[in-house]
Image (cartoon, rainbow, N blue to C red):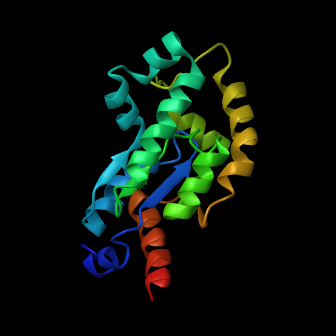
Amino acid sequence: MRDTGLRYAMLDRPLILTGFMGAGKSCVGRLLAARLTCPFIDLDAEVVAMAGRSINEIFAKDGEAAFRALESTCLEHALHRGGAVIATGGGAVIAEANRALMRASGVVVNLTAPFDLIMERLSGARDRPLYAGDDPAKRVKLLMEQREQFYSDADIRIDTDGKSVEDVAAVILGYLRGLAA
């Protein structure tokens, strides 16, 4: 089922999904883009395309700061494309400039999930450098705590625990319909 009426109401404003890695941004984003008949932009994929290297390679060779700079550049480009669904990387919200740009450009939706569910979803992940290391659980817990203040700066927050991708998308579409009314 496509929601083209809602798409026209949002034509110039992107829908921006934020949240910790494993919260469901990419899965929900793809479904929303299909329902809204608009482009889906995965910010991590944009960074990889711009750099010509994987995220792991960027982190290993250039460090997190270089990755964040690329991420900010890609975010700015994505936001200027107009009506699209954008799934940000989990750390895109760290920079105040990114948060300000997202707030000014579109509707910001934060997807949340409890620590245990994030750990379950991330188990076996090899393409997430911030999950790697000796004690990924400790690292994830710390990052979730540090980023909470930034994630809370969203227009709407949705806990994905116990909800299907379709359920989460339906909540977001309902919220958008309220904005368009």
Vertical order, 164 against 24 (above or below): below
Vertical order, 154 against 54 (above or below): below
Nearest the viewer among 3 and 163 is 3
Nearest the viewer among 70 and 161 is 70
Q: Number of marks in the image?
A: 0
Nearest the viewer among 114 and 29 is 29
Vertical order, 55 against 177 (above or below): above
Q: Residue furthest top?
A: 61
- Tell me which corner region of the image, top left, top right, bottom left or bottom right, holds residue 141: top right
In percent of width and height, residue 35 lies at 29, 67
Does 4 sit left or right of 22 as displayed? left
In percent of width and height, residue 1 lies at 24, 73
Is residue 141 shown to the viewer in this render? yes
Nearest the viewer among 91 and 71 is 71
Question: Which residue occupies 38% across, 21% down?
Answer: 54
In percent of width and height, residue 36 lies at 30, 68
In percent of width and height, residue 15 lies at 44, 62
Q: Residue furthest bottom?
A: 181
Q: Quadrant of the C terminus?
A: bottom left
Vertical order, 79 against 147 (above or below): below
Is residue 160 shown to the viewer in this render? no
Question: Which residue occupies 41% across, 67% down?
Answer: 13
Question: Which residue occupies 42% across, 36% down?
Answer: 44
- Tell me which corner region of the image, top left, top right, bottom left or bottom right, holds residue 120: top right
Does 108 sit left or right of 38 as displayed? right
